[in-house]
Image: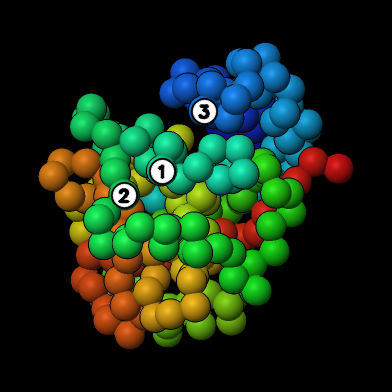
């Protein structure tokens, strides 16, 4: 990515417009104007967060606008995802027993800069970790001083860049855990995105580990 090829503020505006188009304001109990006002302070920090590579088809994104479950529940964000060029909505797998998704929260190592909305930057879907043991992949990412993505961050990445989720290059979200051995993950099922989970010691050849350079909030 070069400065001449990437306009961070224009990209931020695109992401906000896409979320409004997908009905995020209504799901958050806000008007489109109120939603825009809520996230608008982040526009000014988008440029400083856009230092990394931006090539979504290769699974690298400069920054992503993350709307947390405090504004819109995960159960309402997943149906607003699709695969690139497809229309079938994403879904939460039934393997999440009733009430369990609420227990998958950010780990102690993950520091959310704002409880409602923020930017995650220098994002990588992490296909280099396809076939790796998840807990080992998380250790490598920590050693690199990067951070694994939470469920909300992974869903935001997919929502705004559907092209990142492709066959054999899906990704786990080790930043959200519930105290057991399950690691959330996004993959493809029934020609649509699915939020499921895998075991922290079970490798999958088609699941990498998504990560980011960090998170930033306005102010």
Quarter of the rendering containing residue 136: bottom left
Q: Earlier in the sequence, mark 1 or mark 3?
A: 3
Of residues 4 and 134, the one nearer the viewer is 134
Q: Which residue is mark 2?
A: 92
Q: Is residue 57 left or right of residue 189?
A: right
Q: Residue at x 55, y 63 (%)?
A: 105
Q: Which mark is residue 27?
A: 3
- Write down the residue under mark 1: 75
Residue 145: x, y in percent? 64, 73
Left or right placement of residue 90 versus residue 100 in this view: left
172 or 123, which lies in front? 172
Q: Secondary structure at mark 2?
A: strand
Residue at x 49%, y 64% (from the top left corner): 104
Residue at horizontal 61%, vertical 38%? 71
Q: Residue furthest front?
A: 98
The residues tagged by marks 2 and 1 sit, at their Cα atoms, a distance apart of 7 Å
Disc 3, SS: helix
Residue 191 in percent (x, y) is at 15, 41
Position of 136 relative to 209 (above/below): below
Q: Earlier in the sequence, mark 2 or mark 3?
A: 3
Spatial separation of the CA atoms under disc 2 and disc 3: 17 Å
What residue is shown at x 25% (from left), y 56% (from top)? 94
| Label 3: few (<14), some (14–19) or many (≥20) C-alpha neighbours in 10 Å | some
Asked whether, in this view, residue 133 is left or right of residue 17, the answer is left
- Horizontal and vertical percent for residue 132? 32, 79
Q: Are marks 2 and 1 in contact (CB under 8 Å)?
A: yes
Residues under labels 1 and 3: Cα distance?
11 Å
Q: Is residue 106 visible?
A: yes
């Amino acid at each position: 990515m070069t400065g001449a090829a990437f306009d961070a503020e224009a990209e931020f505006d695109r992401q906000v417009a896409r979320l409004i188009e997908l009905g995020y304001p209504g799901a958050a109990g806000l008007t489109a104007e109120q939603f825009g006002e809520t996230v608008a302070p982040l526009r000014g920090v988008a440029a400083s967060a856009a230092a990394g590579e931006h090539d979504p088809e290769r699974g690298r994104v400069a920054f992503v606008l993350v709307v947390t479950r405090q504004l819109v529940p995960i159960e309402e964000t997943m149906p607003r995802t699709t695969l690139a060029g497809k229309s079938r909505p994403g879904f939460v797998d039934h393997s999440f027993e009733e009430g369990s998704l609420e227990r998958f929260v950010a780990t102690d190592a993950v520091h959310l800069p704002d409880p409602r909305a923020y930017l995650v930057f220098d994002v990588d879907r992490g296909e280099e970790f396809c076939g790796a043991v998840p807990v080992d992949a998380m250790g490598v990412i920590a050693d690199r001083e990067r951070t694994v993505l939470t469920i909300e961050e992974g869903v935001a990445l997919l929502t705004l860049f559907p092209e990142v989720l492709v066959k054999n290059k899906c990704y786990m979200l080790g930043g959200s855990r519930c105290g057991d051995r399950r690691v959330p993950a996004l993959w493809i099922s029934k020609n649509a995105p699915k939020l499921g989970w895998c075991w922290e010691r079970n490798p999958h050849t088609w699941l990498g580990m998504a990560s980011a350079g960090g998170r930033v909030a306005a102010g």
